[in-house]
Amino acid sequence: MTDVTRIGVIGCGFFAQNHLHAWSSLRARGARIAAVCDVDPAKAEGTAAKFGVANWYTDAEKMLAQEDLGLIDIVTQMDTHRSLVERAIRKKIPTIVQKPFGPTFADVKAMTAAAHNAGVFLAVHENFRFQAPMRKARELVASGTIGEPKWARISFRTGYDIYKGQPYLKKEKRFVILDLGTHVLDLARFFLGDVVRITAETQSRNPRVKGEDTATMLLRHISGAVSVVECTYESRRLPDSFPETLIEIEGSEGAVVSRNGLVLELTSGGKMQQIDVDPPVLEWASQQWHMVQDSVLSTCAHLLDAVRSGRSAETAAADNLKTFALCEAAYLSASTRSAVSPKILA
């Protein structure tokens, strides 16, 4: 009989629905949504009814006190993360927190330290590296098929109206680097390793948005490889590739290039072949979003396995702290117009 992990989900908003569907899909592997919580009672009650969850709350502290939970999944806006994470850690409950990890480097360092000192599992739900094309590309790079990685471009450029589902993003003073850059910077680390220095230029192209909505970054990796990392919500190119991330990775013996996020072109030994990396559309997914929704399921599965086996996750707090340091270094670079080492933030 499969052991059961009782999961409490805090946050029942737009993106949390993907988490809830993923946990429901992992029922055969022992996942059970035991309780949901949202400050909006209508969202909490409606989500509980939708997913067949017995208990719903509007107060996270009350949920933590009354429920016997084996895992907490925090899917709220980042300014609430530190308080909620620290409450869960005090209860010794393994915890997952949605990206971005937190609003400031001081916050993410404090959460990471609290989890380490308490010996409690803490990981970030960083799902881009769990997208099917990214897993396959990483497999090809790690296998040596293209030789030693030398250069990469990682790009997420879209004009899709992300504000419709998440209107609060318009008010963020630090916007695209934390919301989207954290994904593509994590992919740069995922493919090419940690970073020596980063140079960033930011732009504010939409007058209705408070923070930067475009960032172009140049990274020098410890390995000697160089990557160009781009992110914007103000692209005007058609067709729009949303929500796919486009990659080019050049090695000493070949290259891996994505086409519309659904096909990888592998050049090796002087020949090119196409590899289909488009995942099937899950029962609860929609065609435009299915790549992301599939990655949410894969991320949740990985994190559940890590908690149940007592091992660290790929996106453990200590690892994601390095990605967050890159985000902070990018902001510092843009403001000082200079290259910045993420090590100065450690």
Image: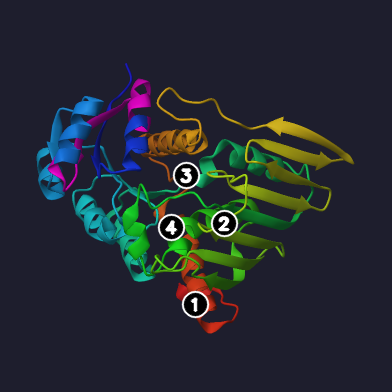
Query: Which circle's residue, 4 or 2, is located before the other in the chain?
Result: 4
Distance from disc 1 to disc 2, alpha carbons, whole Å, reads 24 Å
Q: Position of residue 330 (x, y in %)?
A: 52, 71
Which of the 4 image quarters holds residue 34?
Answer: top left
Q: Quadrant of the N terminus?
A: top left
In the rendered structure, which disc, 1 or 3, sits on the residue that comes first in sequence?
3
Task: Please name the residue that numbered disc 1 is placed on.
Answer: 332
Q: Earlier in the sequence, mark 2 or mark 3?
A: 3
Q: Earlier in the sequence, mark 3 or mark 4?
A: 3
- The residue furthest bottom is 336
What residue lies at 64% left-to-right and 68% top-to-bottom? Answer: 218
Give the alpha-carbon distance from disc 3 to disc 4, as whole Å.
13 Å
Can residue 95 be seen in the rendering of this structure? yes
Going by the numbered disc 4, the residue's amino acid type is: Asp
Disc number placed over residue 216 in the picture, else none: none
Vertical placement of residue 307 versus 255, above or below:
above
Closer to the eye: label 1 or 2: 2
Q: Whole-percent x and y of residue 266?
A: 77, 39
Does the segment drawn in magenta span residue 36? yes
Q: Secondary structure at mark 1?
A: helix
Q: What span is in magenta?
A: 22-41
Q: Amino acid at mark 2?
A: Ser
Q: Which residue is mark 4?
A: 179
Tell whether label 2 touches label 1 (CB within 8 Å): no
Task: Reply yes or no: does residue 257 show up in magenta.
Answer: no
Element under disc 2: loop
